[in-house]
Amino acid sequence: MNLFSLEDLEKTELVDILDSALSGDIPKAKSQGCVALLFFENSTRTRLSFERAAQTLARPYMNFDIDSSSLKKGESFEETLEVLEDYDISTAVIRSAQRMFDPDSYVGNLNVISAGEGTFYHPTQAMGDVLALAKSWGMASVSMLKGKTLLIFGDLRHSRVAHSWFEMADLLGINLKLASPQEWMPEWGAELNRSSNLKEGLLGADAVMALRVQTERHSGQGQGIASFEKSFQCTQDILAKRPLLHPGPTNWGVELAPELKKYENSLIRSQRQECYRVRTGLLARF
Ligand code: CP
C-alpha cells in the first residue's frame, strides 16, 4: 500500500480512517512489523508524531540516518528500499523534496506513507486538519463537513498542505477558497474562488487556515515578506471568532499576528494532536 497523496485512498477508506480517529478509539496494530522513518527534509511535528504513533502501537521503529547511509555513496533509493525489506521492515515513512522512486515500477512489498513531499503532497497533515475542524464543530463524522467553506491563505504555491487540501476538499465536498498575493497563487485549483485580498477571501468562510511563508523555497525575487505582512497578516478582529488553523511551523508576526497565540478559537494544538491520532490510525493499518 502506498499513501503518497489522498487519491491513493478510496473515499470510503479515507472517511473510515478519519471517523475511527474521531471516535477516539486507540486502534490495535494489524502488524507488528518495523517502521523506518526516512526524513530527507527537516521536521519536528511529523517525525515525532510518527515516532510516537509507532510507540503507542508497540511497533518497533528506526530513524534512518540519510547522511551516514549508502545513499551518500550513490546507492539507489529502490535498492535502499530492498535493503529495508530484507531487514524485516514493513513500513517506510518518507519526507522528501521530490518522489524518491516510481511506485509503478517498484516491485517490493513495503508500505510507503508520505510524511510530506516537496510542494506537492502532505496527506496526513490534511487528514489531521480535517479531524481538528470536525471535532471543533462537534461532528460525529467528517462527512458532516460537506458544504462548509474553508479559506486557505498565504504562500499557496509552495505549500504541500494546500495541495493536499485541494484533494481533501474535493473528496469531502468542502468548499475551498484561496487568498494569496498573485505570485504565490498555485498552478492547481484554477476553478476555485481566488482572491488577492484577505478580507475579501474571508467573506463566507466558516474557518480559516494560514500557511507559512516558505522562504527556503523562494527564488529570492518578487513579493517581499514585509509587503505580505502588511497586506495579508491575519489579526484577531478580522477572524471574527472563526476557527483558525495553521499546520505549523508558524512565522508569528508574518502570516499570523502574535496576538493570535492566545486566540480562543485557534485549532493549532488540536491539529498537532489529531495528526498524531491519524498517524497512529495509519500505522495500525499499514
Ligand atoms: N506541519 C508539519 O509538517 O510540520 P513539521 O515540518 O514540523 O513536520
Image (cartoon, helix red, strand yellow):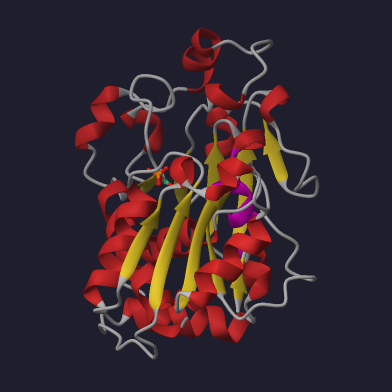
Task: Name the residue at 47% across, 54% down.
Answer: 38
Q: Where is residue 23 in the image (x, y as percent from the top left)?
A: 30, 82
Q: Give residue 194's quadrant in the image.
A: top right
Please determine whether, in this image, residue 68 is positioned above or below residue 149.
Answer: above
Tell me if residue 39 comes above or below residue 215 in the rendering: below
Please state the total of marks drawn on the protein image: 0
Q: What stretch is highlighted in magenta?
A: 159-168
Q: Quadrant of ligand 1?
A: top left
**Front one among 18 and 144:** 18
Horizontal relation, residue 186 to residue 200: left or right = right
Task: Please give the name of the residue rendered at 52% of the width and 57% of the height, measured from the top-left corner.
Answer: 94
Viewer-nearest residue: 105 or 177:
105
The answer, for residue 137, to whether it is visible in the render is no
Location of residue 192 in the rendering, given as x and y in whole percent from the top left corner: 73, 48
Magenta residues, dominant SS class: helix
User: Was residue 162 drawn as part of the magenta stretch in this picture?
Assistant: yes
- Residue 255 lies in quadrant: top left
Foreground: 26 or 87? Answer: 87
Q: Is residue 285 above or below residue 47?
A: below
Q: In this view, does 216 lie to the left or right of 51?
A: right
Say whether residue 83 is visible: yes
Image-based side of 236 in relation to 212, left or right: left
Examine the rendered structure and indicate whether residue 167 appears above or below residue 236: below
Corner quadrant of residue 35: bottom left
The x, y position of residue 134, in whole percent, is 39, 67
In the drawing, does residue 3 fall left or right of residue 102? left
**Quadrant housing the N terminus:** bottom right
Residue 178 location (% of width, % of height): 63, 41
Does 216 lie within the magenta span? Answer: no
